[in-house]
Amino acid sequence: MYANCLLKHMMKRLALIISLILIQISVFATDSLTVIYRIRLDSDIDKSAQRLITLGLEKADKAGADFVMIDLDTYGGAVDAADSIRSAILRYDKPVAAYVNMQAASAGALISIACDSIYMKTGSSIGAATVVDQTGNVMPDKYQSFMRGMMRSTAQATGRDPHIAESMTDTANVLSMTPTEAIAVGYCEGIYETVDDVAQAMAGDKEFVVKSMEDDMTFLDKLIQLLLNPLLQSIFMMMIIGGIFVEIRTPGIGLPLVTAIIGALLYFAPGYLGHLVSYWEILLFVAGLILIGIEIFVLPGFGVAGITGIVAVVLSLAFAMVDNIELFNWDGTLNLQPIIQPLGIVIISAAAAVFGSVWLVKKLYATRSFDHIALRQEMKSEDGFTGVVSGLDSLVGETVTVFTDMRPGGKVKTADGRILEATLKFGGFASKGETLKVLSAEQGRLYCDKL
């Protein structure tokens, strides 16, 4: 019996030892593989794409990646977001490769040139980095000059011909290259048809494994990416401005204020959680709201506090759209170029929100639906509201009924149902329902005494 128990115990120990050995072999085998971390970027270059790349680089470090591959297919987008992505890639301490699959146009070309190596797929292209507006019209030369400088400096940083990069921004004869043309001028390391082919080229003769960022994305990561969509951000911005505007124009605290608060949370929270918005931008927004509140509820008219508050709110919304690193040049001087476009977006969104709010208020104010949006109160005479009334001399000598308790002032109700301001001429107290006699009438007020 004892021998059987001892045998079972030894078998369990042997099984445990074998399991530990297998785990160590598995870990060693995994460690010996070259890890290539793939980030798929197949959308417009905007704030969402900016966070995607910066988050991907962070996740690549946590995954122990030896190389990062940006699987790229984009027609471009916002220059400020592209500049942030370019800067993040240049600062990254491990090799980054761009796989152009299928387009790397405009801002996509800038991102590709920032990478240590470029691979392209058959039928793909790279280039056409001229700065245009949202309608496709070429922007003024100062914008082109800014882009040309970025293209040249990026090419120099990655050991490529800066003149070729600059040619991609030429407004007269813009350069766009096929894979074969890019190889000829040193802008492409090779033509590969699949991600695995590119990974093999990056790993050389070593064994490799490709890890995809999509597999590492949590629900919160995906939610933040969704909320950073430029269209949604514009809607949140209009919710903020429109809600504040309607709340100012209507009494009480109602749905407009709630809408503004929800809009602010949805606008700032994703950027803050995604490390794109700093705390000082949120504080600037709150300070602007406080100043506007002071102007409305404390100080009469419209002066310094109100104007300063509006400027603070607009600037906070604009700065929240820009990577803080972009606001400073390499020498530490302030760079206002990236803030110009976001500031324009904020102003346009603000104008749309104000005009839309005015239209909505006019349409809904006359309907019962407005009562569900904001607090509305009508001052009706039957509820005891009165104004300055003239021609009360005819009531002198008549009797009236106390409508509200008088201490000694209050309201009384006349025989014909009017509710008027009144005061007990000799002081004292009168309860609701008592009958008084009118002694005199002065400046719209009755002076009464008890019977």
Image (cartoon, rainbow, N blue to C red):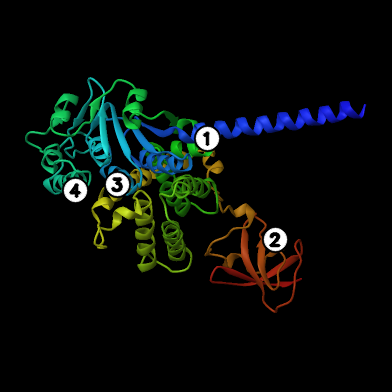
Q: CA distance from mark 2 to mark 1?
A: 91 Å
Q: Which residue was labeled with disc 2?
A: 403
Q: Which residue was labeled with disc 1?
A: 28
In the depicted view, which residue is nearer to us: 262 or 292?
262
Between circles 2 and 1, the one closer to the viewer is 1
Residue type at the position of mark 3: Leu
Secondary element at tag 2: loop
- Dot placed on the residue nearer the N-terminal end, 4 or 1: 1
In the depicted view, which residue is nearer to us: 221 or 19?
19
**Residue 276 appearing in the image:** yes
Secondary element at tag 3: helix
Q: Pick the quarter of the image with the N terminus.
A: top right
In the depicted view, which residue is nearer to us: 295 or 236?
236
Residue 204 in picture, x, y percent from top left: 33, 30
Crowdedness near tag 1: few (<14), some (14–19) or many (≥20) residues, C-alpha within 10 Å = few
- Dot placed on the residue nearer the N-terminal end, 4 or 2: 4
Q: Which residue was labeled with disc 3?
A: 90
Residue drawn at the location 72% of the way across and 30% of the way down: 14
- Dot placed on the residue nearer the N-terminal end, 2 or 1: 1
Q: Please identify the quarter of the rendering in which residue 394 is found.
A: bottom right
Tag 3 and tag 4, C-beta contact below 8 Å? no
Residue type at the position of mark 4: Ser
Residue type at the position of mark 1: Phe
Residue 82 in picture, x, y percent from top left: 28, 42
Residue 263 in picture, x, y percent from top left: 47, 45
Q: Which residue was labeled with disc 4?
A: 153
Tag 2 and tag 1, C-beta contact below 8 Å? no
Residue drawn at the location 35% of the way across and 34% of the way down: 69
